Image (spheres, rainbow, N blue to C red):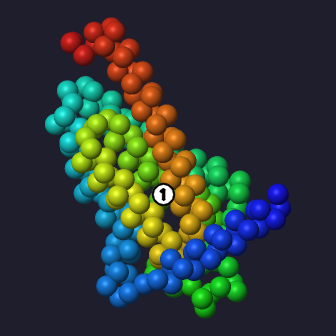
């Protein structure tokens, strides 16, 4: 078992150096943009506005609460629970790798597992994909989530396993919040609260 874990970690390191080392001057600013949280705000505003177009306003408000709950859970579970429990050091904080890594932004916090960026965007993609139920939207938002997550390896902040596990945690939490959203909607419909 120990040998298997060591092999997985070695593969994870090798994949990190392949992705982090595969760069070109044109792609660097694109990946930095995907990695930059404030750049996401216009997209999130569009997603939120879209809820009020496709849903009655009361359901849209509940869906908006679902988005906020998804972000709260993905961020807290990834940052406050898993990172503090696992305490895997970011690749950019490994002293012997300083000359081998292309770090395109600041080092950030000490721990990397799991990626909060990946958890957040895949949580959002899962929850809103289930609410929107439009193939074009689901395809778009999951491509966006993949690019954001990939950028975290590219800029030197995360190992591939951090991103994959962050994405899985985000999808699970997004699905759980969607089930809560459905429960609330069904309860409100049962009590005819949408007609008031």
Judged left or right of residue 69, residue 191 is left
**Residue 134 occupies which quadrant of the picture?**
top left
Residue 49 point in image, percent of width and height: 20, 43
Residue 68 in sight in this render: no
Residue at the image position 31 percent from the left and 85 percent from the top: 26
Which of the pair 5/186 is nearer the observer? 5
Is residue 155 left or right of 140 when viewed as pictured?
right
Q: Position of residue 168 (x, y in %)?
A: 53, 49
What percent of the width, then of the height, locates residue 61?
28, 31
Q: Residue at x 34, y 9 (%)?
A: 190
Q: Position of residue 9 (x, y in %)?
A: 70, 68
Q: Nearer the viewer, residue 47 or 165?
A: 165
Residue at position x 64%, y 52% in the image = 82
Q: Residues within 10 Å of mark 1 (few under 14, many from 20)?
A: many
- Looking at the picture, tell me which residue is in the foreground, 29 or 3: 3
Q: Residue furthest top?
A: 191
Quarter residue 178 falls in: top left
Q: Is residue 66 above or below residue 14?
A: above
Quadrant location of the C terminus in the rendered image:
top left
The N terminus lies in which quarter of the figure? bottom right
Residue at which label 1 appears: 118
């Amino acid at each position: 078992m120990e040998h298997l874990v060591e092999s997985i970690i070695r593969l994870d390191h090798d994949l990190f150096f392949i992705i982090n080392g595969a760069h070109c001057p044109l792609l660097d600013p694109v990946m930095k943009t995907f990695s930059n949280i404030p750049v996401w705000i216009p997209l999130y505003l569009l997603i939120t506005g879209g809820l009020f177009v496709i849903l009655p306003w009361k359901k849209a408000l509940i869906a908006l609460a679902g988005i906020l709950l998804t972000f709260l859970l993905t961020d807290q579970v990834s940052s406050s629970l898993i990172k503090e429990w696992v305490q895997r050091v970011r690749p950019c904080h490994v002293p012997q790798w300083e000359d081998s890594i292309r770090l395109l932004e600041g080092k950030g916090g000490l721990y990397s597992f799991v990626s909060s960026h990946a958890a957040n965007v895949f949580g959002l993609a899962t929850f809103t994909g289930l609410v929107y139920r439009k193939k074009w939207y689901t395809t778009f938002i999951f491509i966006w989530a993949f690019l954001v997550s990939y950028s975290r390896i590219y800029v030197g902040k995360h190992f591939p396993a951090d991103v994959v596990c962050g994405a899985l945690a985000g999808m699970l939490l997004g699905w759980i919040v969607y089930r809560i959203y459905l429960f609330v909607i069904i309860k409100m419909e049962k009590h005819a609260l949408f007609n008031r």
